[in-house]
Image (cartoon, helix red, strand yellow):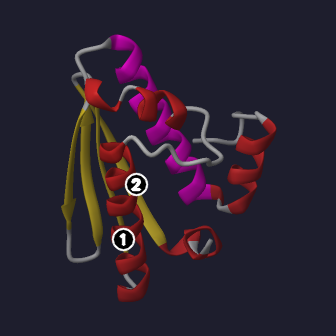
Amino acid sequence: MDLFSRHSELHRTVELVPGGVRTLTEADAPDLAGQLQAHVASMYTHLSQGAEVSCMSSSLPTLFRNSRLYRRTLTNTAKGVAVVETSDDPLISAAIRSHAAEVTGFVDDGMPAMMAGMMGDQSTMG
């Protein structure tokens, strides 16, 4: 929840690459950067273990159920995380890009974007 409440302190870029995305999400505050690194690492652990996480994302269920159909690379940076996610499957690539847009919405808008996701309204998500 701290990531949502401090969303305005996060900086995010998303680059479309063949089959997916390359993202960079960072924060100037070391404690927030550490929370971001821990969160993404935790999510990747859940993906690898097939332990689906209940959340406010319409794309994550697809990614969890098809985690073996896409490649993920997580690199911690001095201020956060760099991620590359790609797939050869067009449906999984679309889910990867959809999730990147959802996360950008969370970074841009914080809790209102999460609440819109819970209500099924994607219009506020980046």
- Residue 16 figure quarter: top left
Compared across the picture, whether 69 is left or right of 106 comes to left
Residue 22 placement (x, y as % from top left) = 26, 42
Q: Does 29 sit above or below residue 66?
A: below
Residue type at numbered disc 1: Ala
Residue position marked by numbered label 2 in the rendering? 43
Residue 105 x, y percent position in the rendering = 58, 48
Q: Quadrant of residue 122?
A: top right
Alpha carbon separation for disc pair 2 and 1: 9 Å
- The numbered mark at residue 38 is 1
Marks counted in the figure total: 2
Is residue 63 or residue 6 the one in the foreground? 63
Residue 5 occupies quadrant: bottom right
Rendered-image quadrant of the N terminus = bottom right
Image vertical order of residue 25 relative to residue 118, above or below: below
Where are the magenta residues, as a range? Answer: 90-108
Residue type at numbered disc 2: Met
